[in-house]
Image (spheres, grey):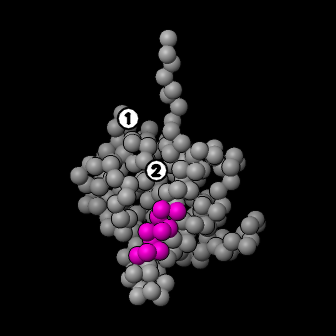
Amino acid sequence: AVSADLSPSPAILAATKLVRNREAVVADATCTDPKSQKQLQRLEPDEAPLVDAMLAEAAKRLLVRAGVARNGCNGEADASAPSNSKDSSGISGGVLSGVSGGSSDEARGEGADSSIFDETLLTHYTQPYEAAVYATSARLVASRLCVPRDMSAAAAAELRAVLIEIAAEAEAFAWRTSGGLL
């Protein structure tokens, strides 16, 4: 008999870990007195909402990559859509209504903090400065990941890939809209 591997994909594991630890990740990214990796420049505490929104975008993209969520209001799975234009349904409708093969609670991970999926939390950047914060926070979180303390190597690779993708898009937006100043 052939046994099916029912373990979650690395992208789902990364999204679950990110959602469950969102508050701690935001706090670390905006810490004014870091205890470790002091050479990495943290963001300002008032930039926490943008860090939080970037983490929500990362979780959404991880779920899209895993094929358990859809991106966009038309239901197509497309993780490459620009993150600076919020779809009409927001993250709640765009991601969680597209979950296939389970409830939105399952996609979030058992016991996960569901507030990361609230539409009001997802603040996409519209200004060059906001995009620069998105990019900086994505690169910082990618740099701070520790394997195996935080997650498996495969899950960390998925998360880092998404974070670098977000950073590249946000940096391009910041550069383009600031006339090359940011």
Residue 96 shows in this picture:
no
- Relative placement, left or right, of 29 versus 87 is right
Q: Which residue is mark 2?
A: 62
**Tag 2: residue type?**
Leu
Mark sitting on residue 153: none
How much space separates mark 1 and mark 2, taking CA atoms?
A: 16 Å
Q: Say above or below: 68 vs 169.
A: above
**Residue nearer the viewer, 136 or 107:** 136
Instruction: Look at the image and say whether residue 147 sits in the magenta stretch.
Output: no
Q: Work out whether mark 1 precedes mark 2 in sequence or the reverse, and give the earlier one.
A: 2
Q: Say above or below: 143 vs 95.
A: below
**Residue nearer the viewer, 46 or 174:** 174
Q: Which residue is mark 1?
A: 102
Q: Say above or below: 9 vs 176.
A: above
Residue sitting at 40 percent across and 68 percent down?
123
Q: SS of the residue at dot 1?
A: loop
Magenta-colored span: 164-173
- Relative placement, left or right, of 76 versus 167 is left
- Relative placement, left or right, of 84 versus 29 is left
**Residue nearer the viewer, 73 or 81:** 81
Res 175 → quadrant:
bottom left
Classify mark 1: residues with Cα within 10 Å, few (<14), some (14-19) or many (20+).
Answer: few
Q: Residue 88, how many percent across, how many down? A: 25, 61
Q: Residue 92, how many percent across, how many down? A: 34, 53
